[in-house]
Image: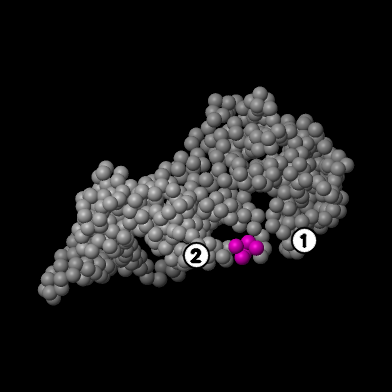
Amino acid sequence: MSHAAIADKRPGSLRGARLPQWGPYAIAAGSVAAGLGISAGAGLHSSIQWALIAAVLYVLGTYGIAARVEGRRQAKDRVATSFVWVAFLLAVIPLASLVWATVKRGVKVLDGYFLTHSMGVVADSEPGGGIYHAILGSLEQVGLATLIGAPIGVLTAIYLVEYGRGRLAKAVTFFVDVMTGIPSIVAGLFILSIMLMLKMQPFGFAGSLALAILMMPVVVRSTEEMLKLVPNELREASLALGVPKWRTILKVVLPTSIGGITTGVMLAIARIAGETAPVLLLVFGNPFINSNPFEGAQASLPLYIYQQYSQSAGSTYAYDRAWAASLTLIAFVMILNLLARGIARWKAPKTGR
Amino acid sequence: MAKRIDVSGLTAYYGSHKAIDDISMTVEPRSVTAFIGPSGCGKSTFLRTLNRMHEVTPGGRVEGKVLLDDEDLYGAGVDPVSVRREVGMVFQRPNPFPTMSIFDNVAAGLRLNGNYRKSELNDIVEKSLRGANLWNEVKDRLNKPGSGLSGGQQQRLCIARAIAVEPDVLLMDEPCSALDPISTLAIEDLIGELKERFTIVIVTHNMQQAARVSDRTAFFNLAAVGQPGKLVEIDDTERIFSNPSVQATEDYISGRFG
């Protein structure tokens, strides 16, 4: 029995000491208390400071206590968990406080009247007025941009995944990547230069064109990923039935991935709905209702928010209106996201029995 | 129905890599021909050249002739889409269309090709499902998704889908390798029935299966890894398994290598 001579370092039992269930919570509570105590003692006033101290104490404390009680391997595991929690809080706190602030300030003037009236003859410093003209403008501009951007984007993605070989595909991929990085103001300037050449006045559709430019690469990228997820076996099964390639794409590949593609398009819409810069250059803004996107200046929600804030001259009414419009914009984007999720779930390939 | 396949001097490439070299053989109508051989010897590649699926793979190209009752599949002006309507295929892993119901899966070939009469569709689907021995198991849930079936049922659904377009030849690329013995038996019985109507070519790694289902067996081999695969011999299944004319075949069948 030679190996009996080697000292067996393993513990006799498979059970080791464990921190109690409430251990992590106790450490968290302790580090928050310590953070508050330290900052009170040192006379620090910012809440960011005590929170950071508490976060550092939490991670270090978790490691120290867990290493003492449970051993080093479990301590590393617990530290990883605590890092995840800290990162989660760091990400959620700004988001939650943003939504909170917007709701708190936005609900003041947000009512049926506000949603159904324009600014019209209401001066920026006066109460009253509404965002009907801005909602209308936003819907028209974003809608037209989607009508242009989404089909081109989806078709480009289909080309890249299903047909693209060689240099042209590589060039298209490269330029899509470049387009992803175009600042929105540059897209606006590009369309503006064309408008100036043709001696045109600002109108809604010009904004749509710039928004479509911004939307396309996002749609291409997300659709490409979704089409790549469709198993090749499905394409081959369809081709082996004697189905032409274009019909295979139309009837097999697209239906399989339609949920993901819709989600991608919706997210792209959400992204362009908040664009201000190109709208400012090309659509100009208009306090009156203009339902024709092809002629005359229009308003849009992000532009309305910017103008209420910048031209308010300290008027609290204008501030309130800007916040209410922000809340409307966030709600619009959120509804779009919910819609996208609903469609994705509805259209997802079913596995029921 | 059920056509003869005559292959002469067929060489297939993936880009510059030669996958199979100079293969010639005849596949009789209304019979089952099994392809056996070690992995990577080009059985599947050769199978895919028989309905021009090989060229779907990027870089795939073919030299040589494949005659389907005297018509060259690789002749000038031959549309690969119409070739595939005559030569159907069943794949290794069951691949029903996930967005379609059982009924739609079987009807897919007809619907996607657009050449059917609405009144016929129900009959064709029932006939195909019966032909694939699946009708009794699914007749009450034709509108449920095909992906809800078991692996063996899915594979029979794929066979029903393939025979619904009434091809002349049915190619099967290891149709049972993902299935349990009972589902395998069901498919083997089905192959025995289908050979009354179709010319069947089956690739298999299971030598007992080849011996059970096929009338003729072709043994493929490759000289070394990276070398193209070659046809060693093709003969009546009984002869291949009892008294093959090439030593390599006997070595492979008796498990001495490969």
Q: Amino acid at mark 1?
A: Lys
Residue B58, how many percent across, how many down? 69, 57
Chain assignment, label 2: A
Distance from the alpha carbon under mark 1 to that under mark 2: 60 Å
Quarter holding residue B113: top right
Question: What residue is shown at x 53% (from left), y 65% (from top)?
Answer: A197
> Which of the 4 image quarters holds residue A102?
bottom left
Identify the colour scheme used. one colour
Q: Where on the picture, by quarter, is residue A60?
A: bottom left
Q: Looking at the image, is A27 positioned above or below residue A144?
A: below
Mark 1 lies on residue = B18
* Residue occupying the far right of the picture: B70
- Check if mark 1 and mark 2 are on a common chain: no
**Residue B147 location, x and y as percent?**
55, 39
Q: Main secondary structure of the magenta part?
A: helix
Badge 1 element: strand
Q: Residue drawn 58% across and 26% down? A: B139
Residue picked out by circle 2: A196
Residue at the extreme bottom: A42
Residue range in magenta is A168-172
Residue A96 in picture, x, y percent from top left: 27, 56
Task: From the viewer's side, name the closer residue of B160 and A266.
Answer: A266
**Crowd class of label 1 (few under 14; some 14 to 19; many from 20; radius 10 Å):** some
Looking at the picture, which amino acid does disc 2 mark?
Leu
Count of marks placed on residues: 2
- In the rendered image, residue B99, in percent from the top left (x then y), is placed at 55, 40
